Image (cartoon, rainbow, N blue to C red):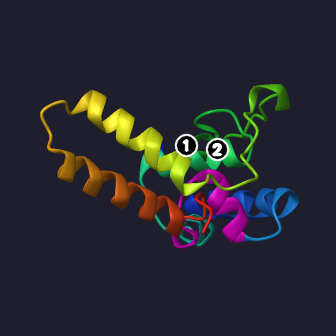
Amino acid sequence: MATRDLRRLASRVKAHRMELYPSRLAAAKAAGISKDTWQRVEEAESVRESTYAKVDRALRWERRSSIAIAEGGEPFLVDDAEVPAVNKEPLRPEVLRSAAFSAARAKLPTASIGDLDAFTDELVEVLRRSGNVAE
């Protein structure tokens, strides 16, 4: 594996983010990561491989472009037709709750209703804090 130049990556991420998003927070939300995690990338700090994949997607780069940049290569832009539209409107809590409960019940058929409710409530709260669920 080539040595990774995280400063080079940080510079490219920040420059491209500023072309696409009004703030780090907006970019982080599009990526599905916290603002602090996005900041770590822009400050050349190491993050998980899965975070780089999320950054790639938010910046409309081909998969593994962040890694390629850190190893001296260049990113490749994906065709906009291949990038799913970011949901501009937060989900309504009742819609999310119903979907989460149904999915949990299907995957955890022996779980109690109380456990399913607790899981569903926690999922809705986590997504609410991330800005993906309407208040």
- Mark drawn on residue 53: 1
**Rendered position, 96 above or below 83:** below
Q: Position of residue 116 (x, y in %)?
A: 25, 47
Kind of residue at badge 1: Ala
Q: Is residue 69 visible?
A: no
Q: Position of residue 67 (x, y in %)?
A: 56, 43
Q: Is residue 52 left or right of residue 88?
A: left
Q: Is residue 127 above or below residue 87?
A: below
Q: Which residues are magenta?
A: 24-37
Q: Residue at the location (53% across, 59% down)?
A: 33
The quarter of the rendered structure image containing the N terminus is: top left
Estimate the x, y position of residue 65 in percent, counting from the top left: 64, 39
Does the magenta portion include 77?
A: no
Give 35 or 3, whichever is nearer the viewer: 35
* Closer-to-camera residue (123/117): 117
Question: What label does residue 56 carry, if any?
Answer: 2
Tell me the residue at 51%/47% (across/down).
Answer: 96
Mark 1 touches mark 2? (CB < 8 Å): yes
Location of the C terminus (image quadrant): bottom right
